[in-house]
Image (spheres, helix red, strand yellow):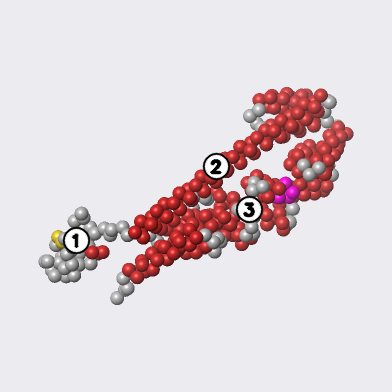
Amino acid sequence: MPHLFCPHCGKDVAEEDRFCSACGRRLDRRRMPGWVPPPSPGRLWYAGLSAMFLAFLLSLVGLGALGAYQGLQVRAAEDKALAEEYYRRGTLHLQEGNILLALAELEAAAQLDPADIRIREELLRVRTEAVGMATPTSETLEQAARGLFEAAASLWAQQEWAAAIEKLEQLRRLAPEHRQAEVEELLFEASIRLAQQKVAARQIREALPDWERATLLRPSHALAVRELEKARLYLQGLDDWASDWHAVIESLVALYRLDPNYADGVTLLEQAHLALAKTYEGEEAWCLALAEYEEALALTSSSEVSSLRDRAEEACRAAASATPTPA
């Protein structure tokens, strides 16, 4: 049992006392030092509900991290497979005696899978061989450039956007002025198409370099600029996740205004409002928590969130009525 004192004179009092035996003042147990209110059934119910909801939020964070990890694994496997294809093509070019094309293929393979010893050793050998060659004639360079352009155009026609982009980038490195306007147009269109495919598959981070490439090629292209901005806002929200809910909400609200249906942005925004509400509850800032619950309910209809909102509203009113009015 807690040890209680009269808040007026400091005299020891019993829990059942209504008046102080020393000074005769009425005792308000809520203001008595040492008094702890007993848990009410409502508080117990709310604590249980809050615990369940917190567990739900933690599971969402965990699922998000797991999804990101699995996404990275898939991307690494795809890069490794593509590197193997470039390596195969490079060795074929070597067999045909085309050192320049072999070098371009092996450079691309090494960028995708720098840990592969076979690729690194073959690239080093081809580089050494290329250095020992006589300076390529303009005819040799033109022939290699034509081969790359034709390969890129064929891949573009087959809607193999990633492979077409790689060929076009190789061509720009080898012969920057070869059919420059056509190369840039093909590269721009392939970048847009590939980025759109990735966004549709919720691969927003993977799509970012494609949007950036497109905007570098066409800085004033409205669609490319807008899509790049949306991708950056989405990823900024993810990068700030769980560390700064205000920043998360700021990014996702801006994204929502640009495109309410972008990926799972609206779901993430709802979760961020709920997480911030729980943070405010932990600080007993009930009115601030209430505002966040109302923002979440504007995005979704959930009986669970409605219950949490009602409890926050009740606590907000109680806190407001308990606040002393200045004299």
Q: Residue visible at 32% across and 73% down?
A: 325
> Which structural element holds mark 3?
loop
Residue at position x 74%, y 41% in the image: 162
- In the rendered structure, are the residues bearing label 3 and label 1 in contact, judged by CB atoms less than 8 Å apart? no
Amino acid carrying label 1: it is Glu
Q: Nearer the viewer, mark 3 or mark 1?
A: 1
Dot placed on the residue nearer the N-terminal end, 1 or 2: 1
On screen, residue 248 versus residue 160, left or right, reads left
Image position, residue 277 (x, y; %): 45, 58
* Residue 319 in view, yes or no: yes
Decide whether residue 203 is among the magenta residues. no
Q: Secondary structure at mark 2?
A: helix
277, above or below 69, in the image: below
Measure the C-alpha gap from mark 3 to mark 1: 58 Å
Residues drawn in magenta: 192-196
**Which of the marked residues, 2 or 3, is nearer the chain's N terminus?**
2
Amino acid tagged 3: Ala
Give the residue at mark 1: 15
Classify mark 1: residues with Cα within 10 Å, few (<14), some (14-19) or many (20+). some
Return the x and y of residue 96 as percentages of the image width and height. Answer: 84, 26
Circles 2 and 3: CB distance less than 8 Å? Answer: no
Most frequent secondary structure within the magenta stretch: helix
- Mark 2 residue type: Leu
Vertical relation: 97 (above or below) 17: above
Residue highlighted by disc 2: 66
In this view of the protein, which residue sits in the foreground, 91 or 128? 91
Is the C terminus in the top left, top right, bottom left or bottom right quadrant?
bottom left
- Between disc 1 and disc 2, the foreground one is 1
